[in-house]
Image (cartoon, rainbow, N blue to C red):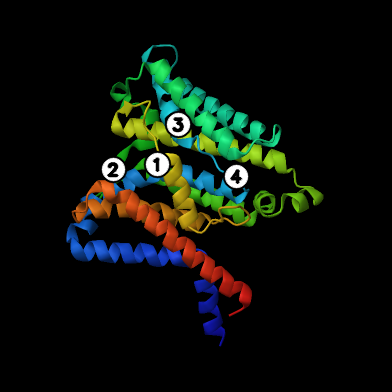
């Protein structure tokens, strides 16, 4: 009976559905094309996964607090353009340019948070407007052309962010360790700290949270700043890895990131979030993108699979949640 109870609790967890789906994806793609689990393909999948994953981790906390950020894709493209423009023009060193890019991104997040909490505009409208503003600034300062980055490929900062090495046949990028580190820190914050309780209370019942002394506005502003900063950090990593800072990069990432978070089991309306689920959601969509190409499905069909997965996972989450509340 106790074992059955443990199984029931495991099945009821929001991470159970994503875990099953990820395992099923891997088995299906591998059975169709054995190269799916080759060292080269696994290495390539991981290198692309961590960049969107960094944004998704921060978005998890923000969505748990009942808000979301549509400007992360634009910040992803803008931050490296700003950094490499400053560096390539000789205005600053690469280290200073990197810090400036992160600080400017944090200020963008601060602006988002203040518009939402002080002026009381919905985060959908605020971040949609910021998406256009930030993308426009990136295009303006770059004249629409990518900024070169390859001259700094051996710089210590570039090596610290995206340096690579081999473990047997597997090529591992340093960005994977950044992703793991951020996931561990944010997972601990969300589940083991007072700040995590504030975040969940803010999204679950803001009125009750305020009555218990939680500074709801300050919590949301801090999370908007975190979201923008992580988007800029991910954009810088991507620019070094691809040797290009394209002002148009990151277009559409905001919706894919939200999909990753929701598929992972974080409540769309706030109050419940899971970093482990988000990590699974990140891998579900990136494995899907990689797998459908390897088995010969046109890449343009990717959005069809995303939509189907979202609908399926939301149905599963709803069923499991109703069963959990019913005590069955």
Q: CA distance from mark 4 to mark 1?
A: 21 Å
Q: Nearer the viewer, residue 178 or 305?
A: 305
First in sequence: mark 4 vs mark 1? 1
In the image, which is nearer the foreground, mark 2 or mark 4?
4
In the image, which is nearer the foreground, mark 2 or mark 1?
1
Q: CA distance from mark 2 to mark 1?
A: 18 Å
**What residue is drawn where x is 65% and y is 41%?**
220
Element at label 4? loop
Which residue position holds label 2?
165
Which residue position holds label 4?
67
First in sequence: mark 4 vs mark 3? 4
Are the residues tagged 2 and 1 within 8 Å (C-beta)?
Answer: no
First in sequence: mark 2 vs mark 1? 1
Which residue position holds label 1?
51
In the image, which is nearer the foreground, mark 1 or mark 3?
3
Where residue 232 sits in the image (x, y, percent)?
Answer: 47, 32
Q: Residues within 10 Å of mark 2 (few under 14, many from 20)?
A: few
User: Which labelled disc corresponds to residue 74?
Assistant: 3
Q: Where the C terminus falls, by quadrant?
A: bottom right
Element at label 1? helix
Where residue 222 sits in the image (x, y, percent)?
Answer: 63, 38
Determine whether 308 is above or below 236 in the image.
Answer: below
Determine whether 47 is above or below 288 in the image.
Answer: above
Q: CA distance from mark 3 to mark 2?
A: 30 Å
């Amino acid at each position: 009976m106790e074992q059955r109870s443990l199984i029931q609790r495991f099945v009821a967890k929001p991470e159970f559905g994503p875990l099953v789906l990820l395992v099923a994806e891997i088995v299906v793609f591998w059975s169709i094309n054995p190269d799916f689990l080759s060292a080269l393909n696994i290495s390539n999948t991981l290198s692309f996964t961590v960049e969107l994953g960094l944004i998704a981790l921060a978005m998890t906390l923000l969505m748990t607090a009942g808000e979301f950020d549509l400007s992360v894709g634009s910040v992803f493209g803008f931050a490296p353009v700003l950094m490499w423009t400053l560096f390539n023009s000789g205005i600053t060193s690469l280290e200073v340019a990197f810090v400036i890019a992160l600080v400017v991104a944090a200020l963008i997040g601060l602006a988002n948070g203040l518009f939402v909490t002080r002026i009381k505009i919905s985060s959908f409208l605020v971040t949609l407007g910021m998406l256009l503003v930030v993308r426009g600034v990136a295009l303006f300062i770059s004249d629409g052309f990518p900024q070169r980055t390859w001259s700094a490929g051996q710089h210590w900062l570039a090596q610290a962010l995206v340096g690579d090495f081999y473990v047997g046949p597997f090529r591992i990028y340093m960005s994977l360790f950044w992703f793991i580190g951020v996931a561990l820190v944010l997972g601990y914050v969300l589940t083991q700290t007072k700040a995590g309780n504030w975040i969940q209370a803010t999204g679950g019942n803001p009125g009750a949270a305020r009555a218990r002394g939680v500074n709801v506005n300050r919590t949301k502003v801090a999370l908007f700043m975190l979201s923008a900063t992580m988007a800029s950090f991910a954009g810088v990593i991507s620019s070094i890895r691809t040797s290009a800072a394209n002002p148009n990069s990151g277009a559409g990432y905001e919706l894919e990131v939200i999909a990753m978070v929701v598929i992972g089991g974080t409540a769309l309306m706030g109050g419940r979030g899971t970093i482990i689920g988000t990590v699974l959601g990140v891998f579900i969509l990136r494995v899907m993108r990689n797998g459908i190409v390897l088995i010969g499905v046109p890449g343009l069909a990717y959005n069809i699979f995303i939509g189907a997965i979202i609908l399926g996972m939301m149905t599963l989450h709803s069923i499991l949640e109703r069963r959990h509340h019913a005590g069955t």
